[in-house]
Structure formats: C-alpha cells, structure tokens
Amino acid sequence: MNTWRNASLAVTAAAVLALTTACGQEQGTDTNGQSVGAAKPADAGYGADSGYGTDTGAAPEAKSAGQLAVWDSKELGEVLTDSAGFTLYRFDKDTANPPKSNCEGDCVTAWPVVAAGDAEAAPGTDPSLLGEITRADGTKQLTIAGWPMYRYAKDTSPGDANGQGVGGTWFASAPDGKKAAPAGAAGGEVTAGDLPGLSVRKDPKLGDIVVDSKGMTVYRFKKDTAWPMSSACTGECLEKWPVVAPVDKNDTEGIIEKGFVTFDRPDGIKQQSIDCWPIYTFTGDTKPGDTNGQGVGGTWYAVSPNAKLVGAPK
C-alpha cells in the first residue's frame, strides 16, 4: 500500500512540476546546474546605429497640421500628412470612442502631438471626421475619426514614414483615421482569405522561413533563451523588433506545434513563441518578402518551420 501511495505522489508531483515550469519560464537551474534568472537587456546586437533611443530632449510644442493632404504611398496606401508633407500617426493604445490619448511624458517627445488649431480636411475627404481632444496640459489635439494624431520625431523630411510599425503600436494614419494600408487591405488588417496567423514561405535565398499573417518575415534573437524562456530584447529594442502577438494554434500552417505557447513578458506584453523561443518581426521590412533583418548584429535570424535559426553560423 505504501509503495503504491509513494509512486502515486511521485507521479502527481512530476506532473505539477511540468506544468509550472513549461518552457522554463520560472527562474530555476539550467542543465549545467547554474543559476538562471532574467536575461540582461540587449545591447548593440539589435543595431546600435539605428538611432533608436536617441535623446530628443524636452517635449516639443504642439504644432497645428494646417491644410491636411493625402500622400499615395506605394507601400502604405493613402497616408494622411500635414501641410508640410509630414506623416501623421495613430497609436493603438489610444481610443477613438471615446477619443483619448495614452501618450504622455517621454512618449510625446518621440511622438509630438498634432495641435487641432487651424487644421483643415484634405481635399476630397470628409471634414466631419476632424475633431479634437483637450489634453491634461490644456493642449487641444487633432483627432481623425476620434483617433488622436501625432508626428514622429525621427521623420526628418516630407514623405518619411519611419514611425510605421514602431513597437507594433504606431501606424501611419489613413485619411479616415484607420491604419494606412495598401489597396486590398482594410484598416491595416489583413482581409479574410489571406495568410494564416503564422505559416511558411519559401524564400529564394533562405529556404523555408516562418511569416506572419501579413507575409512579413519572423525572426529570433540569439540572446534570448527558451529554457527558461526569456527575452533579451527590451525597451528601445522593441521599437525596431516588435513582438509577434499571440496566435491561435489552429491559425497556423506548416510550423512546429511543440512549445507553441504565449510568453508573458515581464514588461506586460504578451508574445508568441515557437518551441518556446520568443519571435519578432522587423520594422526595417516594409513589404512581404523582405528579409532585411537577416543577420543584423550577428544576432537576428529568420526562423525555420521547426523554430531553428536560418543561416546562423554554427
């Protein structure tokens, strides 16, 4: 009887341990007996020369957009600009109903507020979409269809759209306040019948690689770990390498299902993983088929269907 009870308790304990240490997300000990904790933040491995993280100083005074215009971008579709031709952006963490900005403090240094002021609707667009909100400091900010409008501090010339996709939350605004998107897509979202959440594309140089629902290349960071699961891409790194948001396992095609779990990052962001490896996209890829992130810093590589690094040195 005691032998049976001991064996039963051992099996139960093992099952609980397996559940609580899935993908090694809990701090513990690696196979070499070394203490394992949170990964150190990424350094130049994510591209120190990118300019991200440069101190832009105090928040600039909000400037009016004046006469709005529409820029027809080959890559982004119709993009709303101010009178000087600078791209206007919207922030996914804001709300349009009711209109509210969640960009405060240091955020408005990188993303200057567009003042409502004398803004006029772009020719051929609906003037009733223009509105305004009053910010905590009393500034009246322009809204389009309820979405607060911003510029990006690192757009230095008319026609720049360097803020597109930053952090996976900032997007150029279309004239109707939706996310700018090429013809055939609506509001920046892929329409029904397009790619699954994650699938496989045969690249002429790299072979089979994982892509997201928009056909954009998916990457892994060599400084991350799977056991325990941790990400070394934090803070400013995520502006250049946005995480892949959680994907339903049934919304995948051709990729490994082992370790297909959501990573609850310490910064509160939920990130998809494959075989327990956190995965990302690259803001330097502007269209499906781009692989501009391949080999960046010797630490970023496309992902194979079985979650391996593609083309990384042995």
Image (tube, rainbow, N blue to C red):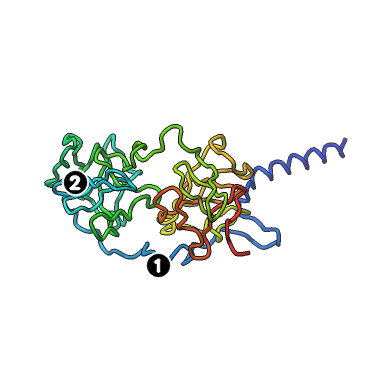
Residue 23 in picture, x, y percent from top left? 62, 48
* Residue 125 image offset from top left, x and y in percent: 19, 37
C-alpha span from label 1 to label 2: 32 Å
**Residue 221 pos. (x, y %):** 53, 58
User: Under tag 2, what secondary structure?
Assistant: strand
Q: Which image quarter is the C terminus in?
A: bottom right
| Farthest-out residue, top | 192
Residue occupying image coordinates x 47% and y 41%: 213
In the rendering, which numbered label is found on residue 69?
Answer: 2
Q: Identify the residue position indicated by label 1 in the image.
A: 49
In the rendered view, tell whether residue 74 sits above or below residue 311: above
Between residue 210 and residue 145, name the one nearer to us: 210
Residue type at the position of mark 1: Asp
Task: Specify few, some or many for label 1: CA neighbours under 10 Å numbering under 14, 14-19, or 20 or more.
Answer: few
Give me the residue at 44% from left, 43% from top: 214
The local secondary structure at tag 1 comes to helix
**At which x and y percent is residue 307?**
60, 50
Relative to the observer, which residue lies in front, 16 or 289? 289
Quarter of the rendering containing residue 224: bottom right
Residue furthest out toward the left: 118
Given the image, on which type of amino acid does mark 2 rest? Ala
> Which callout, 1 or 2, points to the residue nearer the camera?
2
- Left or right: where 110 falls relative to 134: right
